[in-house]
Amino acid sequence: MKALQLQLNSLSANMLNMEVNRNSLQFVIIDDDSINNMVCKAAIKSATGGIIASCFNNPVEALKYFRNYNETNNDGKQIIVFLDINMPEMSGWEWLENYSSLPGQKKDNVLIYILSSSVNPTDIDQAHSNCLVKNYLVKPLTKAKVIDVIEETNSKSLIEFKIAH
């Protein structure tokens, strides 16, 4: 029992010392709510040791960004997108439809997470049935959720663990 407790304590210490390879990872937030965007940026910065997320209050501008990104970048970065569902100009569902038709081969590097305050089972089912959506998260975004998302990517190049002494 004591050995298990020591392992758990060690795991917790290692998790606190997680460092994210900043050259391999980028975050994008697409949400019309500026307060939520500030919360997301703070959670991401805290979880990653300082990565600054790009925010788009307008989903059309986010589409333009990805159109340009897909056509010009070959840096191999993993991009994690937090996408809101309910936005005035274009819903998250409409954004996904438009994104899917963008040209470019870089979509494999983009992981899209729905980040919504909705707990409606229809929204959750729709997200899980969309092949572009990695997972559905309920607001607010927290440091713990960001860490879970990073771990969920299963990319060893993104995460480096330091052994706590």
Image: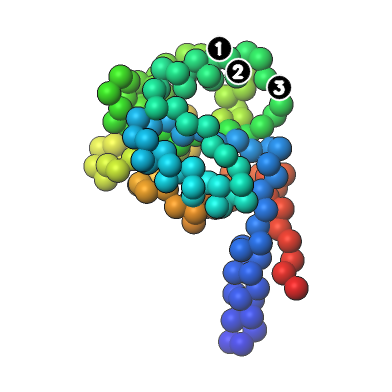
Would residue 61 appear left or right of 73 to someone viewing this image?
A: left
State which tag comes first along the sequence, 3 or 1.
Answer: 3
Q: Is the C-beta separation of discs 3 and 2 under 8 Å?
A: no
Would residue 130 appear left or right of 118 to someone viewing this image?
A: right
Q: CA distance from mark 3 to mark 2?
A: 8 Å
Q: Which mark is residue 137?
A: none
**Tag 1 residue:** 103
SS for tag 2?
A: helix
Seen in the picture, residue 141 relative to 104 is either above or below; the reply is below
Q: Indicate the quadrant where residue 164 lies.
A: bottom right
Q: Residue at x 37, y 35 (%)?
A: 34
Q: Is the C-beta separation of discs 2 and 1 under 8 Å?
A: yes
SS for tag 3?
A: loop
Q: Residue at x 57, y 24 (%)?
A: 107
Q: Residue at x 40, y 22 (%)?
A: 59
The percent coordinates of residue 70 (x first, y second) are 60, 18
Residue 126 or residue 17, whichever sits in front: 17
What residue type is disc 2 on?
Asn
Q: Indicate the quadrant where residue 83 lies.
A: top left
**Tag 2 residue:** 70
Residue 56 or residue 6, whichever sits in front: 56
What residue type is disc 3 on?
Asn
SS for tag 1?
A: loop
Which mark lies nearer to you, 3 or 1?
A: 3
Could you tell me if residue 67 is visible in this image? Answer: yes
**Tag 3 residue:** 74
The percent coordinates of residue 147 (x first, y second) are 54, 52
Q: CA distance from mark 2 to mark 1?
A: 7 Å
Q: CA distance from mark 3 to mark 1?
A: 14 Å
Seen in the picture, residue 83 relative to 43 is either above or below; the reply is above
The percent coordinates of residue 24 (x first, y second) are 69, 37
What residue type is disc 1 on?
Pro
